[in-house]
Image: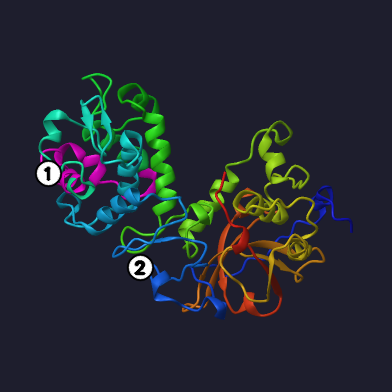
Amino acid sequence: MKKNLINLKRIAYILPILPILISDITILPVYATNKQYENSQGIEFYNADACSVLDTGSITKTTGSVSDNEASVVRHLTTKNFSGNNKAPLNAVQIAAILGNLQQESGFDPKANNQDLYRGIAQWNSGRWDGIKEPRDDLENQLDYMQQEMDGGYKKDLSDFWESNSVSDIEKATYAVTRNYEVAIKSDSASKSWSSDEQASQDVQGWSKRLEYAKKAYIKYANQATGPYSSGTECGGLLSGGMNLDEANSFMEEYKSLEPKNWEENTLGTEYDINGTTCKESSLANCVAFSQYFINRYTSKKAYHLGNGNMVVGDLLDLGFEDGGTTPKVYSIFSANKYTEYGHTGVVLGIDKEAGKIIIGEAGCGEGLDWIKAREYNLEEFSSGDYTYAYTDNFLEGGL
């Protein structure tokens, strides 16, 4: 059969209903467990060298993706207990909301000075600036003062912020910090509570940028509320160590949401090379299409004109990806020869070695768009020799 995407409409594999699971950890001996690279659930990072770590005890410098000041802010927010947060450190959504605002206000520069009217990382006005202990341009002094204010006079108005604990709350949390802590309002009539993106744009200054920065910060620091953090940027926006089942299904929903009304009129079709992978439900509902999407979005390589599901790993090895043999690894691409003559392919999104489970992101024609999801299987089955793997570690980079 020709290696041509046009033929993929004939080859999409439909996996029978099997058990399902997920988690996160590599199982290659070369990446043996190293406590320095474990997160709070004891899950090993998939590649300790590819993902910089912001440890709560000491900050490891990254390759320019995270400044020393930003790292210090993250360390403060992950180790200090906030009374408004039930005397606990902030969670990842709350951290992202603060980081998004501070990046917009000052770029994390404690010496930022706007015409002597607004100063420091939060651009405090003269009245509030005077409350910071000397030296006022010291970052730690400013962070202590920010926490003091948030736990003091600003605590009540930040109720939306304290209540935010899931990624769906990121707009609400970011708006609360902008409106009720930064007080970056366009008029005194600005609402104190989150309502909509349109309302936020009307009420507060620089809203689109603040939210954009907050979302990027969440991608970088979403692993845990406390404990080690990956910088994320070298990991392509993927969670270091892999994903749990809920995170993996959110990842798959993002993939499903890419479908435009007409692929031929949308650049995503060209970018991810999914135009020719026709299924009656959607071009997205194709196993090869999803593997191509992952490669083209999250690695520095471009994978076009891959063959059938059982050919994908071989084609990726020809492109320079590392041969993983029959050993699965987080964010590796697999090919399977079983079930149909065309085989199957998908992405390993998480591995739980102790539980003996693996989480797979996959798509397949014939079962409808709802079949595109993450599923949990027995790790033993995916290590049995029926599946081969191409490792993506060396080429993972920032997502689009």
Secondary structure type for disc 1: loop
Q: Quadrant of residue 111?
A: top left
Residue 44 placement, left or right of 399: left
Query: How far is mark 2 from mark 1, CA to CA?
Result: 36 Å
Residue at 39 percent across and 75 percent down: it is: 35
Q: Nearer the viewer, residue 289 or 43?
A: 43
* Image coords of residue 265 (percent x, y): 71, 31
- Residue at the disc numbered 2: 40
Question: How many residues crowd around disc 1 within 10 Å: few (fewer than 14), some, or many (20 or more)?
Answer: few
Residue 27 placement, left or right of 124: right
For badge 1, the amino acid type reads Glu
For badge 2, the amino acid type reads Ser
Tell whether position 362 is magenta: no
Residue 122 placement, left or right of 388: left
Question: How many residues crowd around disc 2 within 10 Å: few (fewer than 14), some, or many (20 or more)?
Answer: some
* Image coords of residue 336 (percent x, y): 73, 69
Residue 364 placement, left or right of 34: right
Q: Is residue 364 above or below residue 163?
A: below
Magenta stretch in the rendered image:
142-169
Residue at 73 percent across and 45 percent down: it is: 273
